[in-house]
Image (cartoon, rainbow, N blue to C red):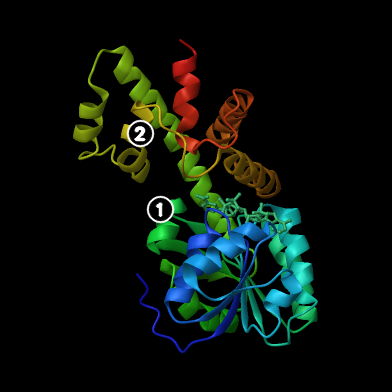
Amino acid sequence: MSDSATAPRNVAFLGLGTMGFPMAGHLARAGHAVTVYNRTAAKAEAWVAAHGGRSAPTVEEAVAGADTVFLCVGGDDDVREVTAKALGALAPGAVIADHSTVSAAVSREMDALASARRVSFLDAPVSGGQAGAEKGILTVMVGGDADAFARAQPLMAAFGRSVVHMGPSGAGQLTKMVNQICIAGLVQALAEGLSFAQRAGLDGHKVVDVISKGAAQSWQMENRGHTMLDGKFDFGFAVDWMRKDLGIVLDEARRNGATLPVTAVVDQFYADVQAMGGNRLDTSSLMKRLTAKG
Ligand code: NAP
């Protein structure tokens, strides 16, 4: 899937979760020398069994000698913890690319810490979900130093179809926030439409097939419409992660004055899904909340 025709590089990948595991795999397939680290060591062993390369028992050992370090972990505090460890072992001139979705503030904080050690820190959140990571067709929105971006971009092309520099540190995360705002209301609208179709006695699958060819078409409708009707939510992007992301969005909106009434209410709908035990269900489980209401 990769079109990253670039000389082999020494890289490290930290965090082999739903996203990181396949992303690191694309880097190895593109011919780079990849050392992986995962907090739970079994995943790192499974990755090496699948892709070759090397695993290391600590962050510090994984990044030693790497010119570029990728991370894809959890929230702000996870990025702080992993970045601090990496910075302790990286040589000046190295680049850290953080693919986690976190606040713009923590990205700027990490950028300042990294700069003090003459390391570059790029905030580089991704969109495209598990399937996009597996197929190597993610969208990567990057903030930070332009020269560091130019060096990291050919590597990110191993797992990204669209890899775009959005501006200074934090600009990648701010772009990802726009992405999440656009998704939240849309998934709720899709859940409402499909639940309406069911109550109206229509064949929901036929409805999705026909209206996805018209103006209501969306990635969510094409990729999640049928599974929502079938009550399948055991895959994809977890509700817990979406609540983290919407929390970041709503915090940022309080700072910049943006009015996000739909995003705020959908965030509460996701809290309902969590209360129903749906923490790890896909975000399309907003449908479950409507059907559960009987
Ligand atoms: P995941 O499957 O839960 O995996 C998280 C990974 O991060 C695991 O490898 C975990 O290690 C590691 N980790 C978390 N906190 C850590 C810490 N403090 N120190 C060391 N390792 C730590 O998550 P994911 O779905 O891959 O998502 C990762 C990031 O990408 C999140 O920021 C998420 O919002 C973002 N994202 C996800 C998607 C998606 O569709 N899943 C899409 C776009 C963006 P263990 O194995 O030890 O738990």
Q: Position of residue 42 (x, y in %)?
A: 63, 58
Quadrant for residue 207, please give it. top left
Q: Nearer the viewer, residue 110 or 250?
A: 110
Could you tell me if residue 125 is visible in this image?
Answer: no
Q: Position of residue 124 (x, y in %)?
A: 57, 65
Quadrant of image for the C terminus: top left
Q: Earlier in the sequence, mark 1 or mark 2?
A: 1
Give amino acid for label 1.
Ala
Q: Is residue 271 left or right of residue 133?
A: right
Q: Does label 2 point to a residue whose CB lies under 8 Å from ligand 1?
A: no
Q: Is residue 291 left or right of residue 17?
A: left
Q: Is residue 230 above or below residue 149?
A: above
Could you tell me if residue 191 is visible in this image?
Answer: yes
Q: Nearer the viewer, residue 118 or 178?
A: 118
Q: Is residue 284 above or below residue 46?
A: above
| Residue hosting label 1 | 131
What residue sits 49% from the left and 13% below the top?
293
What residue sits 78% from the left and 70% below the top?
85
| Residue hosting label 2 | 227
What residue sits 53% from the left and 61% below the top?
21
Helix, strand or loop at label 2? It is helix
User: What whole-number distance in Å separates the C-alpha atoms at marks 1 and 2?
Assistant: 15 Å
